[in-house]
Image (tube, grey):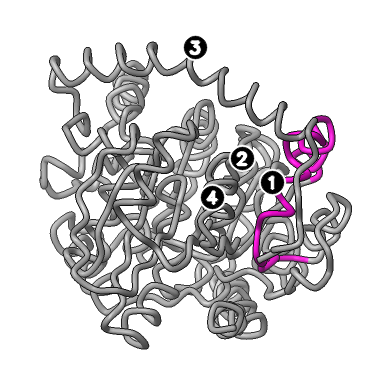
Amino acid sequence: MTKTFKPSIKQNIVLLGYSLLWLIIIPFTLVNFSYKLIRRKPGYTKARLSRYGFTQNQNKKMDALVIHCASVGEVVAIQGLVEHLLLQSPQQHITITTNTTTGADRVKLLFSDRVSHAYLPYDFPLFVKLFLKTKRPSKVLINEMELWPNLCHQCWSSHIPVIVINGRMSDKSKQTYQNFPALFKPMFAKITAICAQGRRDYQNYLALGVPSLKLTLTNNIKFDLSVSNQDIALSQTIKSNFSLEQRLILVAGSTHEPEEQILVDAYLTLAKVYPQLLLIIVPRHPQRFDKVHQLLQKQNIETVLMSESQPCQSSTQVLLCDQMGKLRSIYALADISFVGGSLAERGGHNALEPAAVGVPILMGQSTYNNPAICQALAESGALLYVSDAQQIESACNTWLSDPEQRKSAGAAAKQVLTNNSGALEKTLTVLAS
């Protein structure tokens, strides 16, 4: 922790102005919360009062840890780290905070009652102070890059170390922080340590004024991804329940609009050559399940919904996964994978999930969330970049027509994980120090 840092008068005034802006925002959040609570919208329960600092302390132990993950992807990324922490320090109580309901659901799915969950408070000083007073963490870990000025300030004031793990800092985010130096420069000064996930991120943190003594280049913790026995067992169950034994499978994972339509267009052409080909679509967000289903129905695409548990017929064209928490198991079924958020300009989601099960990967050019990962996979021949349905069709045809080449690309994907592992151990070392 930077104990010698002292904010200037201007910096304190700017932080105060930022906090006062929340007084304008908070009434709207309360109205929205009340409306959704009354309407019983999924995920809107009294548990969301933690966004206003009101949360239960289920911690009966002295040693507590808070880990913040914005949503599903960040929760999945820290699974290995949390498992190690639980094994290393059984006496430590861990609370994982998220912003989203889907993130909360994934915490429960992965860790059950071994950790607690809470929604991260809005970044208003009183809310953050109440939350920290209740949880009493010895450390606060922030996964990837969701940084909040008041959260960092309140932790700093209370002598609670804030450590960024698997730290990401894109060029765009760096520019945003640089545009408001009076607000964000002191925020970075109040952070104890940062584990940068790549060379780009490390250099961008340096450019933001973070001293090198606070920085550790751990590489991306996602490279330490492991596929659990439960994932494999679920994969076999899905294969059996949906009669997929004789199908070639193209999985489109974590998709956004308009990626589903682009994949369908490519699939319809490929299916003329490979009639046993099945497209499995896994939308990124559950609120789009119905919309994607309607998209398929309008085109008379023969579709089976995973929630209906009906086996696919030989004529089935699309299996739509309308359930959360199954993507990793579904990737294990794939002959070829497409990782979403990459044609839809969302920065690309985790390409290491299909890589971990030896599946070759297609992605669009938007990969700014994980550029080092995608570069390593592309250089190994495990990942091909595509920009439209025609290129998806061409790339799939290359791998479908040559099973040995497809197998080689999948093996290269798994090797990338092996060659780049070690971030987890480096991160644990930083936390221990």
Task: Give the position of the N terminus as an image quadrant.
Answer: bottom right
**Disc 1 or 4, which lies upstream in sequence?**
1
Magenta-span inclusion, residue 179: yes
Q: Element under label 1?
A: helix
Q: CA distance from mark 2 to mark 1?
A: 5 Å
Percent coordinates x, y for residue 306 in the rendering: 20, 44
Q: Residue furthest bottom?
A: 88
Labels 1 and 3 touching (C-beta < 8 A): no
Front: mark 4 or 3: 3
Amino acid under label 4? Val
Amino acid under label 1? Met
* Residue tagged 3: 24
Q: Element under label 4?
A: strand
Q: Residues within 10 Å of mark 3 (few under 14, many from 20)?
A: few
Front: mark 4 or 2: 2
Percent coordinates x, y for residue 123 in the rendering: 49, 34
* Residue tagged 1: 187
**Disc 1 or 3, which lies upstream in sequence?**
3
The residue shown at (72%, 51%) is 188
Amino acid under label 3? Ile
Q: Element under label 3?
A: helix
Amino acid under label 2? Pro
Labels 3 and 2 touching (C-beta < 8 A): no
Q: Which mark is residue 339?
A: 4
Q: Quadrant of residue 175?
A: top right
